[in-house]
Image (cartoon, rainbow, N blue to C red):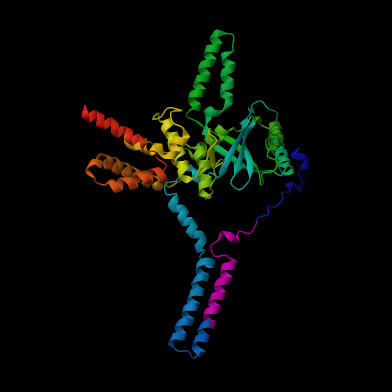
Amino acid sequence: MISKRLKKKNGKIFMPMNMSVNTDSENFMNVPKLIVTALLVVASFVFGNFIMKSRLNLIGYIIYMLVFILIFQLVVRYIIVEETYFSKMYAKHLANKRTKLDVIWKISSVRNTPEGAILMYNTAKIGCVIRLERDTIVGKASDNEELHADAWSDFYRELNEKKLAYVQLNLMELAEKDKRINDLANIASNVENENLRLILEQEVGYIKEISRATLSENDYILIYRNSANKMDSLIEDVKEAAAQLLKGAYSDVVVLSEKDIYDLPKSMYNTEYFDGIGAQINVYKNNNTKIKPVVSITSITFSDASSMDIGDRERKVISKLTSLVKDGSLKYGEWSLKEALNGRMNIINFKNKTTHSELVDDTNYSDIDSTENDNKKVIKSTKTGKRKRGKNQKLEQFKEDENYLEDSMGIDLSILDELDDETDLMSEE
């Protein structure tokens, strides 16, 4: 027990002195900056003395002064004023004018396990959060307070032996989160005496009503490792260390799940909404991390044993075909992929004059849009040319357009001939 380990002398208890580190770096003007400032002052006197004694013409004086001023302002900006650091802070301030909880969120991913959630930070640290359920101390022995202190001491020793770091959180939360209230409600509902059960249930209901408007202090501890090693054994090590706290005034230790982790910032900052998944995505965005696609289609082999190389244009066509099937414009299996890649999609979309939502990504769709517009213009001029073929108008332009569609785009114009024949029959009737 702690009382046995205390060193007493003349009625006084020996307490080790806290070793505080140097806080010089917390001030803006620290020792390195003072040294640089003194060197700049000395350099200014030396340079001024050199200029006074030298016999230079006007151009020479200007060149020397410009060089000295350039070096002087660079030293002041980047060493004394720390322009790089404060410019980044200012840019971050502008980006976070409308601040969200994502600013303080540094967890890149959450790995949920049956025993609790493991947090993975963007600095390669891993950790988990435990919640301590307080026990009732009424009726305990007189030495319970000392046993509680011993439990904390043993807990810290276990963490040090397992090379685990920790951060303690004491949060004020609604008292209705205390699970002892639910335990009390279960006890009251199981009383056999009907009148006594009614009285106890009313009493518990009154306690619940008060707890919804009352704050209580809850204990949370973030336990983490500085590296991603031994991830599988992290929760087991945490539970072994936290078991020491059960010797004190705590009834249970719970490793928070993924859902509880997302609720924790709301309790810390008293907000009603927090998007944990969006916060994880913003961690990668703020670090300018670009995630490459897992699978990329480079070629397709059809059922007739023919194959086609897939480039950016073909990928856009495949994405658009997928959106047509999803929004119901096309039935599954109505078109073959080969027909869509050969240009059928462009003709049908033009004839129906319908627009479909496309998959949103970072790709620039201006190229394929311009290509579709060009195809529409060519098809329109082609149909006009066929109708006016008897009048010998734009016949040469029609042939050029027809060759362009058939050779370059791989579009079969026989469908236009059939449509024109049907149009002529209808006009004759």
Vertical side of 34 occupied by 194: above or below:
above
In the orientation shown, which residue stands out farthest toward the bottom?
A: 55
Picture coordinates of residue 64 (x, y %)? 49, 82
Q: Is residue 9 within the magenta segment?
A: no
Give the image location of residue 81, x and y in percent: 50, 65
Which is nearer the eye, 228 or 416?
Answer: 416
Q: Is residue 18 above or below residue 162?
A: below
Look at the picture and state if 306 lies above or below 114.
below
Q: Is residue 230 left or right of residue 107?
A: right
Q: Is residue 54 left or right of residue 155?
A: left
- Chief secondary structure of the magenta portion: helix
Name the foreground residue: 376 vs 361.
Answer: 376
Where the C terminus falls, by quadrant? top left
Q: Quadrant of the N terminus?
A: top right
* Position of residue 100 measured from the top left corner of the image (x, y, whole percent): 46, 43
Residues in magenta, as a range: 21-46
